[in-house]
Image: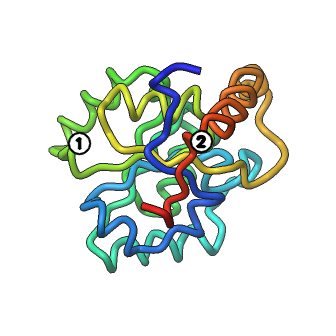
Amino acid sequence: MLKIHIPYAHASSIFDIEMDFFKKEGVKTLLVDLDNTLDSYQTKTPSKRVYELKDKLAENGIQMIIVSNNTGKRVTTYATELNVPFISSIGKPFARKLIKKMKELGIDLTTSMMVGDQTVTDIACGNRAKIKTVLTDKIVKEDQPTTHFNRLFDRPIRRSLKKKNLLREWRSL
Ligand SMILES: [Mg+2]
């Protein structure tokens, strides 16, 4: 486990987090991972609860942006259907493309927060970009084949974070 793998907070699921948490943290832009954070990689179109989450965020003045390592087609179809901005093939765990795109979109990183289900990609990228991060658990058991390799690292990192008491629940903050 490295320092970049330590999330700011942990939530069982993005759907559990109350809007008050984001507001208290001063979040204006929520950068959300797609696969196994919002929906299964096999789900082509957004689930009902994802639409509800987007609307609830919007009502609270928070813009959702999908940031995915997945390729253009999958992300474009999904995000277009949901009608939110997106960045595909973003290159997590690295933050170079994210920072560049945020600049292009005129988005302030200091009022952004990253949410994702993988320490080695989502959390590392957010920390590198100096964005607050929330680590979630997988929403479905199945990962896409390319993620299996990452899980070999993600699982022991999570164990280590737990053991060292470094997974702070969002409710406790
Ligand atoms: Mg994911």
Q: Position of residue 130 (x, y in %)?
A: 30, 33
Image colouring? rainbow
Q: Nearer the viewer, mark 2 or mark 1?
A: 2
Q: Is residue 56 above or below residue 126?
A: below
Marks 2 and 1 close (CB-CB < 8 Å): no
Question: Residue most toward the right?
Answer: 141
**Which residue corresponds to mark 2?**
165
Classify mark 2: residues with Cα within 10 Å, few (<14), some (14-19) or many (20+). Answer: few
Q: Residues within 10 Å of mark 1 (few under 14, many from 20)?
A: many
Residue in the picture at 80% in, 28% down:
145
Q: Quadrant of ligand 1?
A: top right
Residue at (31% x, 76% y) in the render: 60
Quick one: label 2 or label 1, which is nearer the N terminus?
1
- Looking at the image, residue 94 sits to the left or right of residue 143; the answer is left
Q: Amino acid at mark 2?
A: Asn
Question: Relative to 26, is 65 on the left or the right?
Answer: right
157 vs 17: above or below: above
Residue 64, horizontal then vertical, whole percent: 39, 58
> Which residue is at the front of the view, 159 or 53?
159
Image quadrant where one finds the N terminus: top right
SS at circle 1: helix
State the residue position of label 1. 109
* Residue that appears at 79% across and 52% down: 140
> Which of 36 and 9 lies nearest the eye of the viewer?
9
Q: Circle 2 sits in a helix, a strand or a loop, which is it?
A: loop
- Left or right of 23? Residue 150 is right
